[in-house]
Amino acid sequence: WLQSTNWVWGVADALRKGFPDLALKHFIIDGADAALWTKPWRQVDDLQRSIIVERAAAPGKDDGTEALRRAIVADQGRYGSTPHCIFWPEMSAISSTAARKALLNGDRPACEALLHP
């Protein structure tokens, strides 16, 4: 179950209280470009987990999966998912920035091309 919210930790706490018999784990999701900036693999533990979505680099930039692999190997000596930090396989060349822009502008054709129905 996925939910987008600005009240990240509060929602996770509320869900844990509401469903005490479940082992709920909270993950933050970043694209490879954002992860290169925030470096979430350095901060993960049992309470703060991360999913990093691999992606192709933006045209003319070194901000995709290969740059991410180099940064993590330089930090940790290896690249690979762990129980606390999961690497989501590279997907088609989509842009969350373009999707947000299309949503904000009410651009239905662009939304239909960028987002799953």
Image (spheres, rainbow, N blue to C red):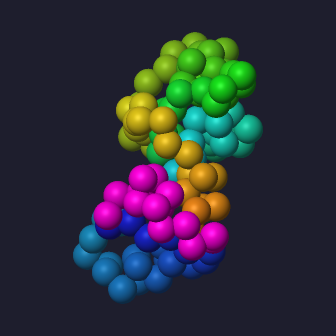
Compared with residue 5, is residue 72 higher up or lower down, i.e. above or below? above
Which of 80 and 4 lies nearest the eye of the viewer? 4
The percent coordinates of residue 18 (x first, y second) are: 36, 86
Q: Residue 104: in sight, yes or no?
A: yes
Give the position of the N terminus as an image quadrant: bottom left
Seen as rendered, the residue at the extreme left is 21
> Residue most toward the bottom?
18
Determine the image quadrant of residue 20.
bottom left
Please name the residue shown 55% across and 67% down the image. Answer: 107
Position above or below: 10 against 100: below
Q: Nearer the viewer, residue 4 or 25?
A: 4
Q: Where are the magenta residues, as a range?
A: 104-117
73 within the magenta span: no
Q: Is residue 27 visible?
A: no
Residue 14: x %, y % from top left: 47, 83
Q: Write the residue at 49% across / 42% down.
A: 94
Q: Is residue 78 left or right of residue 19?
A: right
For the point 64% across and 61% down, which residue is it? 101
Q: Considering only vertical position in the picture, is 83 above or below 20?
A: above
Task: Tell me residue 84's x, y (percent).
Answer: 46, 43
- Most extreme residue toward the front is 109
Residue 50 percent across, percent down from the top left:
51, 47
Residue at the spot 63% in from the left edge and 71% down from the top edge? 104
40 or 30: nearer the viewer: 30
116 relative to 4 in the view: left or right: left
So how many labels did they put on this image?
Answer: 0
Quarter of the C terminus within the rendering: bottom left
Q: Main secondary structure of the magenta part?
A: helix
